[in-house]
Image (tube, rainbow, N blue to C red):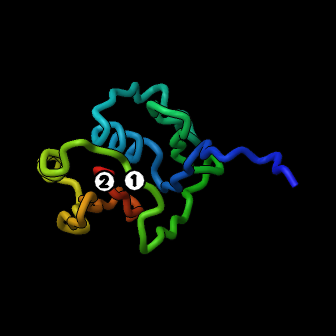
Amino acid sequence: MKSPIKNQMNTVFVHVSDLLTSVEWYCRLLGQTYVAEEVIEPIYKMNINHYTGLLLDAGPRGEKKQVYPSKHPTFNFHTDEIENAYSFVKELGYHVDSPIGRYDDLAFFTVKDPDGNIIMICNA
């Protein structure tokens, strides 16, 4: 039977407790700017350069969301320069969760966002 569901990721949701803090953190990580007055709870759609979007979700409005981060990364951001990416994240003062791991054609490291969500930075 042919599936009506496309073989395509649409949006990744990252659950956050403080939307403005998370918007700032992710924008700094990705080298993006934002206007604080345009960060309106409960969600913020990040400007992502591909099909898959990234939505920071602090909802419902007016309540502080309780976040229970996974112990494992649920997605990654790509880099062509793993060493430079690692140095950049360290310079930002972000919590690097793992050193660079290397395999034959893959290198990666992980970083924690303000809520403890583990994000992988990967070159494959």
Q: Residue drawn 22% across and 62% down?
A: 96
Q: Position of residue 37 (x, y in %)?
A: 45, 26
Name which residue type carries label 1.
Asn
In this view, 77 is above or below 33: below
Front residue of 114 and 48: 48
Q: Residue drawn 28% across and 33% down?
A: 31
Query: Which of the 4 image quarters holds residue 42?
Result: top right
* Label 2: element kind: strand
* Label 1: element kind: strand
How many numbered marks are there?
Answer: 2
Q: Position of residue 90 (x, y in %)?
A: 14, 53
Q: Residue drawn 40% across and 47% down?
A: 22
Name which residue type carries label 2.
Cys
Q: Which residue lies furthest to the right in this view?
A: 1
Q: Residues within 10 Å of mark 1 (few under 14, many from 20)?
A: some
Front residue of 38 and 92: 92
> Which residue was labeled with disc 2?
122
Q: How crowded is mark 2: few (under 14 residues within 10 Å), some or many (20 or more)?
A: many
Q: Position of residue 73 (x, y in %)?
A: 42, 64
> Which residue was labeled with disc 1?
76
User: In this image, 92 relative to 119: left or right?
Assistant: left
Front residue of 20 and 100: 100
